Image (cartoon, rainbow, N blue to C red):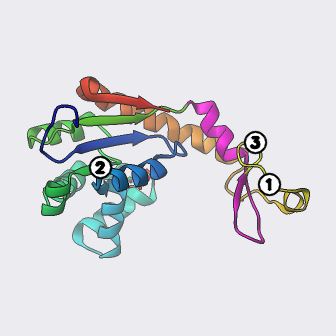
């Protein structure tokens, strides 16, 4: 975009599996380019917190880990994308689209990103990240046995595993990953020409 000398603000969609580091990347990208971060999950949680009609409808689906119906999500995301701040500064859309119909809806409104960033981290690495994670109960600091080991034996001896970071969690991660891959596959063909893979 910079090379093309394009004057319009940048429009980015990002997609990444659970534990892929998407949250960190979103922070870095929005800071660097001054984009408005729009996360579908955050918009939905705000509706739930405000107890709006949409929020009341969405709550049940979210509690069951199911996709909220398009009637609610599509308008909500579209309206946020068309707000003056998003239009002026550009946007980073996260958690949307999760199906081909959600992607098609954006196209119907003439909303097309400049870049589709796909954080492509293998399942083995994602599971390893979750399972190797440890907590220092004294300082609250998070370690990873392999990637971010404790500084000394004293700390090492008191590390605990967060209750949700067990092998059981690894199974759940695998399940969520499968859903994520299905969601990505559904939208990838539409954005093939603008996809950038990162790992
Ligand atoms: P997660 O990565 O755990 O799905 P999110 O914050 O992205 O977390 O989403 C939380 C919940 O909000 C999802 O489980 C789903 O119910 C709903 N949701 C988020 N994005 C969408 C979307 N694009 N379409 C439908 N439902 C969505």
- Sequence order check, earlier mark of 3 and 2: 2
Residue 171, percent from left and from top: 64, 40
Q: Which residue is mark 1?
A: 150
Mark number, residue 146: 3
Q: Is residue 177 left or right of residue 171?
A: left
Determine the residue positioned at 24% across, 65% down: 54
* Discs 2, 1 touching: Cβ within 8 Å: no
Determine the residue positioned at 32% across, 62% down: 44
Per the image, label 1 sits on a secondary structure element best described as loop
Residue 165, percent from left and from top: 69, 52
Question: In the figure, residue 139 lies in which quadrant?
Answer: bottom right
Question: In the figure, residue 170 lies in which quadrant?
Answer: top right
Work out whether 28 lies above or below 98: below
Determine the residue positioned at 48% across, 31% down: 120
In the rendered image, residue 141 lying in the magenta stretch gets the answer yes
For the record, the magenta segment spans 122-143
Q: Given this view, does label 2 or label 1 mark the residue nearer the observer? A: 1
């Amino acid at each position: 975009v910079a090379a093309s000398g394009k004057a319009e603000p940048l429009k980015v969609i990002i997609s990444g599996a659970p534990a892929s580091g998407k949250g960190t990347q979103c922070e870095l990208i929005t800071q660097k380019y001054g984009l408005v971060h729009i996360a579908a999950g955050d918009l939905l949680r705000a509706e739930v917190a405000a107890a709006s009609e949409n929020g009341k409808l969405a709550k049940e689906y979210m509690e069951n880990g199911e996709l909220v119906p398009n009637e609610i999500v599509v308008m909500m995301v579209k309206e946020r994308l068309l707000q003056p701040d998003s239009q002026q500064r550009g946007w980073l859309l996260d958690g949307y689209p999760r199906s081909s119909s959600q992607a098609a809806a954006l196209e119907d409104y003439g909303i097309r990103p400049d870049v589709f960033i796909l954080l492509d981290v293998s399942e083995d690495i994602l599971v390893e990240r979750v399972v190797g994670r440890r907590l220092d109960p004294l300082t609250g600091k998070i370690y990873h046995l392999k990637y971010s080991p404790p500084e000394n034996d004293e700390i090492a001896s008191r590390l605990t595993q967060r209750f949700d970071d067990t092998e059981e969690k690894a199974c759940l991660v695998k399940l969520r990953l499968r859903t994520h891959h299905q969601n990505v596959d559904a939208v990838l063909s539409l954005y093939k020409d603008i996809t950038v893979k990162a790992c």
